């Protein structure tokens, strides 16, 4: 599967953005999806993930209550709605795909996502 993330940009603190990740192919529903982010000089960190049907979602503590992950399988797309953005949310955001379902104990692990998009820059000014 090939992934393309877009929707990043520059926004003021307290603002919002919606990221999209479009997947190629006809088997999108066979993949669990995740969003990770990487700030300069830091490791790529987990943001959110979602099961194949969209029923199960997982979030990092730093974004819980502010970000919402969702997917529309008919559109081969996973979204990340980001509200109440903070300067510390500034990073390159990547979407990842994991073949098969995702279970809660691995939902935040970067190593289970084997396919990655190119990333989209999100910058939050104070």
Image (spheres, grey):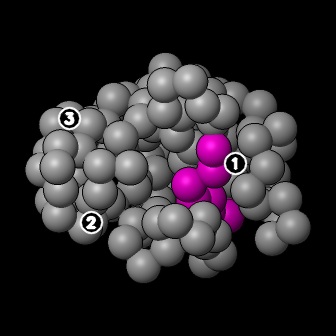
Residue at 80% across / 71% down in the picture? 104
Percent coordinates x, y for residue 33 in the rendering:
62, 50
* Label 1 sits on residue: 31
- Name the main secondary structure of what is drawn in magenta: strand
Residue at 39% across / 55% down in the picture? 80
In the image, 87 versus 31, the foreground residue is 87
Vertical side of 61 occupied by 47: above or below: above
Vertical side of 67 occupied by 89: above or below: above
Percent coordinates x, y for residue 6 in the rendering:
32, 33
* Label 2 sits on residue: 83
Q: Quadrant of the N terminus?
A: top right
Residue at 27% across / 66% down in the picture? 83
Q: Secondary structure at mark 2?
A: loop
Query: How far apart are labels 3 and 1 at the CA level?
Result: 27 Å
107 is within the stretch colored magenta? no
In the image, 28 versus 61, the foreground residue is 61
Q: Residues at badges 3 and 1 in contact (C-beta under 8 Å)?
A: no
Q: Secondary structure at mark 3?
A: strand
* Label 3 sits on residue: 9
Query: How far apart are labels 2 and 3 at the CA level?
Result: 14 Å
Query: How far apart are labels 1 and 2 at the CA level?
Result: 26 Å
In the displayed orientation, state which residue is furthest to the right.
Answer: 105
Q: Nearer the viewer, mark 3 or mark 1?
A: 3
């Amino acid at each position: 599967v090939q992934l393309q993330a877009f929707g990043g940009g520059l926004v003021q603190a307290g603002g919002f953005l919606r990221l999209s990740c479009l997947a190629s192919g006809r088997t999108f529903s066979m993949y669990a999806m995740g969003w990770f982010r990487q700030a300069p000089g830091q490791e790529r960190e987990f943001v959110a993930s979602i099961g194949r049907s969209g029923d199960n979602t997982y979030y990092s503590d730093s974004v819980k209550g502010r970000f919402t992950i969702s997917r529309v399988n008919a559109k081969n797309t996973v979204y990340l709605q980001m509200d109440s953005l903070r300067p510390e949310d500034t990073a390159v955001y990547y979407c990842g795909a994991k073949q098969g379902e995702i279970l809660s104990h691995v939902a935040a692990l970067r190593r289970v996502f084997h396919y990655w998009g190119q990333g989209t820059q999100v910058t939050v000014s104070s």
